[in-house]
Image: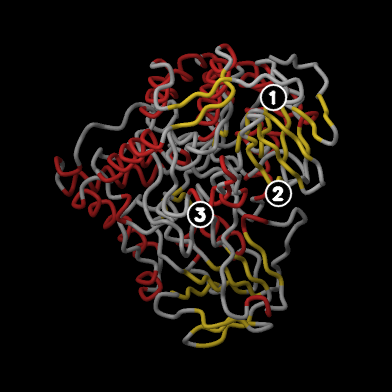
């Protein structure tokens, strides 16, 4: 393999690498570090101005980690990194996560192999050369045997198509593309569209400053107290002292965190009073552990699910003083089957005099004007629109890239009916292309930095296997893709998740295939891909390398 210090080869206007990586977020950064440590020449392209991916773009008010957080939402490959970085809060704010990632980039000298403010506009596979060629927005061309797409599961903003929205003359911001300069809300009338995670995090913060906030709710949500708190020095010291054991526990845990396994107990085994006591205890404690200490059938049994849903709805009625507003905030889907949300005073915000809730199911938006949004019931004068409308998740960033595989087939053609893949990592007809956190993988259902590490470690071992056997191209069979789809669907169909419209099922994007595409087996997934490797990478077809001085850099 190419030495880390070997200069990049050029032929004509094309630069040759061993691997091209698209994306410099959490996954792309580790891809660069890990593959470079293997001795490969790597080039990373990213459209942003610096590293961070999601954490570079999502700077909206209140943005912070809203899963099981610090100090375990982090890289695990370096014990030294763990020892030298102090986390301040359990749910770190966006700026703290970005500061951590900037430290990682500096510590491992990543910037030198990343080209920023550069979008990959075309990626094509050359069957004769067994290489991918990419063309960038800067007019450059780069070639490599391997293409790694670390383009992010939540990076393609969903921009709503609402009549007149482009006529609106005020300020308009999407939470996933927030300005880097401060946005002032003081003295302004603000409309927020959407009450997913970014909406629920930002609305309480905006309401503290704006003269009035109109919340345009598309779907009522279950939201749970974040329970954010400071991390004591003793906690960090304990994590460092027991890092090896904690890392092993993270690998074993269904969600990739160092927690004990979920209780093996049905909600229906307890009395209503006992269930209420448990839910109340978890609610008061707050944090993502709420979901990890529940009964084991909340997302399997309708009756068990209803017991928790009723508890949260009762909490909303208890918190929100106006009964009519509280009823508008009542979710009517299975709890936890949309992305679980943690908040810091979201429901309490509707007790403020300067906050109005509009339920778009009953009072839909008709159009925007230059200075207002008009719903069926009337006109709402506004100065600012905040689009908390989410993303074309999981598959959207890959479809935006739209690579071209064998025979020039585009990914949009290949994925027109469903997101065909094997192991959530590879796609038939697209040799030597790997996707991180894509459809068919655990993705957002797992600790994403750890998940990226584990997927990329597997990919790196696969690359070494191919090199040692002089294999020039590899891709899955369509049969293995079909078997994997059946496995993913089989696990999901045993739960309530596919029965709820969500961005997990593609329901937020018109024309998107509607089905649950994530692997819900948690840590079982990593055992499954390990088993594939042990069985000499079953499910793949291999093509011998074609040696050529012009095309070969290994």
Decide: few, some or many residues near mark 3? Use Cα within 10 Å; few <14, some 14-19, many ≥20: many
483 is higher (above) or lower (below) than 183: above
Can residue 96 be seen at all in this image of the molecule? no
Residue 546 place in picture, x, y as percent: 63, 21
- Using residue 16 as the reference point, say whether residue 517 is left or right of it: left
459 is higher (above) or lower (below) than 446: above
- Using residue 268 as the reference point, say whether residue 201 is left or right of it: right
Residue under numbered circle 2: 121
Q: CA distance from mark 3 to mark 1?
A: 38 Å
Residue under numbered circle 3: 197
Residue 517 place in picture, x, y as percent: 40, 46
Decide: few, some or many residues near mark 1? Use Cα within 10 Å; few <14, some 14-19, many ≥20: many
Q: Nearer the viewer, mark 3 or mark 1?
A: 1
Q: Determine whether label 3 and label 2 are within 8 Å by CB.
A: no
- 121, 515: nearer the viewer: 121
Residue at 52% x, 88% y is: 378
Residue at 67% x, 82% y is: 371
Q: Indicate which disc, 1 or 2, sits on the residue closer to the N terminus.
A: 1
338 is higher (above) or lower (below) than 546: below
Residue at 58% x, 26% y is: 75
Can residue 479 be seen at all in this image of the molecule? yes
- 412, 91: nearer the viewer: 412
Residue under numbered circle 1: 18
Rendering colour mode? secondary structure
């Amino acid at each position: 393999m190419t030495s880390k210090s070997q200069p990049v080869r050029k032929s004509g206007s094309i630069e040759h690498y061993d691997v091209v990586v698209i994306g410099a977020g959490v996954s792309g950064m580790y891809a660069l570090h890990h593959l470079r440590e293997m001795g490969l020449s790597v080039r990373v392209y990213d459209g942003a101005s610096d590293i961070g991916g999601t954490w570079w773009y999502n700077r909206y008010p209140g943005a912070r980690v809203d899963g099981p957080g610090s100090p375990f939402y982090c890289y695990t490959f370096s014990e030294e990194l763990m020892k030298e970085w102090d986390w301040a809060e359990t749910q770190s704010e966006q700026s703290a996560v970005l500061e951590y990632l900037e430290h990682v980039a500096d510590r491992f000298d990543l910037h030198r192999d990343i080209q920023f403010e550069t979008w990959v506009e075309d990626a094509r596979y050359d069957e004769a050369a067994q290489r991918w060629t990419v063309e960038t927005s800067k007019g450059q061309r780069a070639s490599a045997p391997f293409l790694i797409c670390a383009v992010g599961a939540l990076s393609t903003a969903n921009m709503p198509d609402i009549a007149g929205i482009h006529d609106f003359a005020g300020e308009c911001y999407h939470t996933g593309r927030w300005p880097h300069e401060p946005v002032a809300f003081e003295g302004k009338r603000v409309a927020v569209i959407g009450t997913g995670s970014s909406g629920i995090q930002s609305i309480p913060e905006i309401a503290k400053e704006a003269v009035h906030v109109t919340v345009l709710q598309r779907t009522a949500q279950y939201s749970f107290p974040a329970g954010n708190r400071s991390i004591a020095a003793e906690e960090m010291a304990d994590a460092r002292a027991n890092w090896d054991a904690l890392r092993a526990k993270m690998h074993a845990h269904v969600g990739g965190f160092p927690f004990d396994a979920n209780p093996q107990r049905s909600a229906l085994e307890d009395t209503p009073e006992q269930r209420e006591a448990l839910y109340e205890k978890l609610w008061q404690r707050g944090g993502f552990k709420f979901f990890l200490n529940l009964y084991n059938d909340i997302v399997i049994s309708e009756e068990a699910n209803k017991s928790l849903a009723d508890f949260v709805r009762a909490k909303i009625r208890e918190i929100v003083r106006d009964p009519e507003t509280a009823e508008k905030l009542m979710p009517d889907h299975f709890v936890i089957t949309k992305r679980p949300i943690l908040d810091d005073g979201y429901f309490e915000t509707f007790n403020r005099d300067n906050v109005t809730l509009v339920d778009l199911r009953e009072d839909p938006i008709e159009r925007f004007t230059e200075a207002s949004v008009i719903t069926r019931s009337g006109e709402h004068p506004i100065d600012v629109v905040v689009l908390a409308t989410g993303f074309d998740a999981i598959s959207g960033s890959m479809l935006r890239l739209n690579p071209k595989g064998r025979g020039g087939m585009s990914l949009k053609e290949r994925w027109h009916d469903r997101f065909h893949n094997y192991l959530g990592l590879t796609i038939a007809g697209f040799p030597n292309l790997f996707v991180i956190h894509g459809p068919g993988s655990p993705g957002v259902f797992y600790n994403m930095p750890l998940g990226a590490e584990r997927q990329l470690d597997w990919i790196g071992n696969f690359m070494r296997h191919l090199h040692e056997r002089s294999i020039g191209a590899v891709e899955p069979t369509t049969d293995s893709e079909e078997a994997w789809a059946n496995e993913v669907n089989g696990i999901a169909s045993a739960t309530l998740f596919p029965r709820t419209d969500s961005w997990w099922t593609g329901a937020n994007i018109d024309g998107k295939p509607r089905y649950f595409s994530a692997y819900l087996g948690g840590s079982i997934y990593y055992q499954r891909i390990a088993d594939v490797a042990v069985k000499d990478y079953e499910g793949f077809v291999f093509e011998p390398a074609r040696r050529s001085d012009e095309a070969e850099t290994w």
